[in-house]
Protein backbone atom coordinates (compact mmCIF):
# COMPACT_ATOMS: atom_id res chain seq x y z
CA UNK A 1 0.00 0.00 0.00
CA UNK A 2 1.41 3.40 -0.96
CA UNK A 3 1.71 6.29 1.48
CA UNK A 4 -0.97 8.17 -0.45
CA UNK A 5 -3.41 5.27 -0.28
CA UNK A 6 -2.85 4.92 3.45
CA UNK A 7 -3.40 8.65 4.03
CA UNK A 8 -6.56 8.59 1.92
CA UNK A 9 -7.90 5.62 3.86
CA UNK A 10 -7.20 7.38 7.17
CA UNK A 11 -9.00 10.52 6.01
CA UNK A 12 -11.97 8.46 4.80
CA UNK A 13 -12.16 6.81 8.22
CA UNK A 14 -12.14 10.24 9.89
CA UNK A 15 -15.00 11.35 7.63
CA UNK A 16 -16.93 8.19 8.44
CA UNK A 17 -16.32 8.75 12.15
CA UNK A 18 -17.52 12.37 11.90
CA UNK A 19 -20.74 11.24 10.26
CA UNK A 20 -21.34 8.61 12.91
CA UNK A 21 -20.78 11.17 15.68
CA UNK A 22 -22.97 13.76 13.97
CA UNK A 23 -25.86 11.40 13.35
CA UNK A 24 -25.49 9.48 16.64
CA UNK A 25 -25.72 6.33 14.56
CA UNK A 26 -22.75 3.96 15.02
CA UNK A 27 -23.70 2.16 11.80
CA UNK A 28 -23.98 5.23 9.55
CA UNK A 29 -21.95 4.97 6.38
CA UNK A 30 -20.29 7.80 4.54
CA UNK A 31 -21.90 8.40 1.13
CA UNK A 32 -20.72 10.46 -1.85
CA UNK A 33 -23.29 13.19 -1.13
CA UNK A 34 -21.87 13.61 2.40
CA UNK A 35 -18.48 14.57 1.02
CA UNK A 36 -18.75 18.33 0.84
CA UNK A 37 -20.33 18.79 4.26
CA UNK A 38 -18.06 16.46 6.22
CA UNK A 39 -14.93 17.60 4.37
CA UNK A 40 -15.65 21.13 5.61
CA UNK A 41 -16.21 19.81 9.15
CA UNK A 42 -12.96 17.87 8.89
CA UNK A 43 -11.04 20.96 7.75
CA UNK A 44 -12.33 23.02 10.65
CA UNK A 45 -12.02 20.35 13.33
CA UNK A 46 -8.74 18.58 12.49
CA UNK A 47 -6.83 21.06 10.34
CA UNK A 48 -8.07 24.38 11.82
CA UNK A 49 -8.87 25.74 8.34
CA UNK A 50 -11.52 28.44 8.21
CA UNK A 51 -12.80 28.91 4.64
CA UNK A 52 -14.27 32.32 5.51
CA UNK A 53 -10.85 33.58 6.67
CA UNK A 54 -9.24 32.34 3.45
CA UNK A 55 -11.84 34.18 1.36
CA UNK A 56 -10.66 37.48 2.86
CA UNK A 57 -7.33 37.05 1.05
CA UNK A 58 -8.92 36.31 -2.31
CA UNK A 59 -11.51 38.99 -3.12
CA UNK A 60 -13.73 38.06 -6.07
CA UNK A 61 -12.77 41.06 -8.21
CA UNK A 62 -9.09 40.03 -8.10
CA UNK A 63 -9.61 36.30 -8.55
CA UNK A 64 -12.08 36.37 -11.47
Image (tube, grey):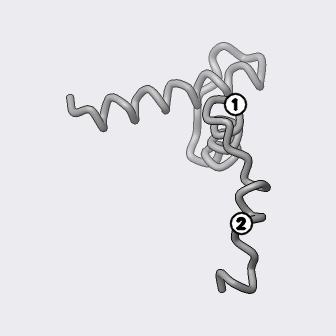
Which tag, 2 or 1, sits closer to the chain's start?
Answer: 1
Q: Quadrant of the N terminus?
A: top left
User: Residue 53 location, x and y as percent?
Assistant: 77, 54
Above or below for 12 versus 51:
above
Q: Residue at x 66, y 86 (%)?
A: 64
* Label 1 element class: helix
Q: Are marks 2 and 1 in contact (CB under 8 Å)?
A: no
Q: Which of the 4 image quarters holds residue 21? A: top right
Residue tagged 2? 57
In the drawing, does residue 39 fall left or right of residue 23?
left
Q: Residue furthest left?
A: 1
Q: Residue at x 65, y 81 (%)?
A: 63
Residue tagged 1? 45
User: Residue 22 location, x and y as percent?
Assistant: 76, 25
Above or below for 61 versus 5:
below
Q: Which of the 4 image quarters holds residue 49? A: top right
User: Residue 58 location, x and y as percent?
Assistant: 70, 71
Q: Residue at x 50, y 25 (%)?
A: 13
Q: Residue furthest front?
A: 57
Label 1: few (<14), some or many (≥20) within 10 Å?
A: few
* Label 2 element class: loop
User: Residue 9 location, x and y as percent?
Assistant: 40, 30
Alpha carbon distance from label 2 to label 1: 21 Å
Q: Which of the 4 image quarters holds residue 47? A: top right
Amino acid sequence: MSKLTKAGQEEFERLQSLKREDTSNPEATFQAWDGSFYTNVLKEKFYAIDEEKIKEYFPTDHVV
